[in-house]
Image (cartoon, grey):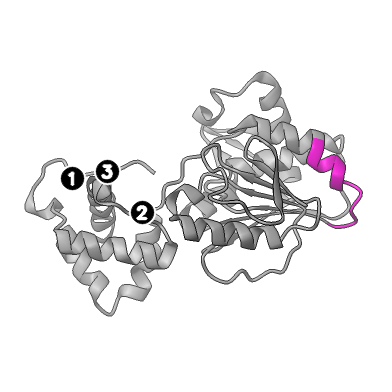
Amino acid sequence: MPALAFASQSADAELSDPDFRMVAEIIGREAGIVVRDQKKAMVRGRLARRTRELGLPSIAAYCRLLRGDEFARELPGLLNALTTNHTAFYREEHHFTHLEQTALPAHSAASRLRIWCAAASTGEEPYTIACTLQAYFGGQRHPDALILATDLDSDVLETARRGRYGAGSFDKLTPKQRERLQFTLTQDHFEAPETLKEMLRFRQLNILHGWPFGGPFQIIFCRNMLIYFDQPTKANIITRLMHMLPPGGFLYLGHSEALPQPIDGLRPCGRTIYVRA
């Protein structure tokens, strides 16, 4: 989600230090995201956008709303505004190569195959997982395979559910990748085929809170989300994810998200790929 700001640095667009500290505390408490002082300009820009969406006269007025009785109702809007959702089809392609060549062969015989994409964003990642499954099984459906795709941001999940993307989302893909995805051009957008959509279940989830499912998941993707948390929070989340894996289950992290500390029971088996021992 790009940082935005009002065209001019008027009083309407100002974010006071007390208001910034309040917003940073809310984001830290509710989402576990560490917002440092150098991110103030980014926060100001995103609050400016949310302020305009609500028709409020200034960022200060928006922050007064957060301090008042409307806080609980507005909290999802605040979290959506400040959550970064950069993603792409086949991002970090080596993970999908490992998924097809190692992880799926290890678990394809399971009567119940479950995969969790824990930072689904606008859906490009879970759709890439789904088309990798489809390719591995030769275009046939596993009798009981589902991909749970979760994200904190309810707005991006709506985009993911629709499965509709502009042509720019496909510009950097190879011909083979485009062929695998099998998206169809409909008017001014590309739409995911039903064969992929029916494998996916989208749910809003704050990963810091309780998880309303018991697993196990043979494969978990949790990529490019942990970078926003402090070290103890990262270690706690990874430990919880590990306990969702059966022995031999695989965990994929983002390219800059090596384990913050050794986790007993997880061992590396590739570039930011881990297996439960």
Q: Could you tell me which residue is drawn at 43 percent across and 61 percent down? A: 32
- Which quadrant of the figure contains the N terminus? top left
Residue 81 visible to the viewer:
yes
Q: Amino acid at mark 3?
A: Leu
The image shows residue 46, relative to residue 92, as above or below, that is: below
Residue 256: where, in percent of width, then height? 51, 38
Relative to 112, 65 lies left or right: left
What's the magenta region?
A: 102-112
Disc 3 target residue: 4
Q: Could you tell me which residue is drawn at 73 percent across and 31 percent down? A: 97
Disc 1 target residue: 6
Q: Which mark is residue 234?
A: none
Relative to 224, 51 lies left or right: left
Quadrant of res 203: bottom right
Question: Which residue ends up furthest to the top in the rendered image?
Answer: 175
Q: Amino acid at mark 2?
A: Leu
Real-space Cα separation, disc 2 to disc 1, in angstroms: 16 Å
Relative to 276, 150 lies left or right: left
Say which of marks 2 and 1 sits in front: 2
Say which of marks 2 and 3 sits in front: 2
Q: Amino acid at mark 1?
A: Phe
Q: Residues within 10 Å of mark 2 (few under 14, many from 20)?
A: many
Disc 2 target residue: 82
Residue 245: where, in percent of width, then height? 74, 57
Relative to 171, 51 lies left or right: left
The image shows residue 63, relative to residue 259, as above or below, that is: below
Q: Residues within 10 Å of mark 1 (few under 14, many from 20)?
A: some
178 or 87: nearer the viewer: 87
Residue 131: where, in percent of width, then height? 73, 38
Callout 1: helix, strand or loop?
Answer: loop
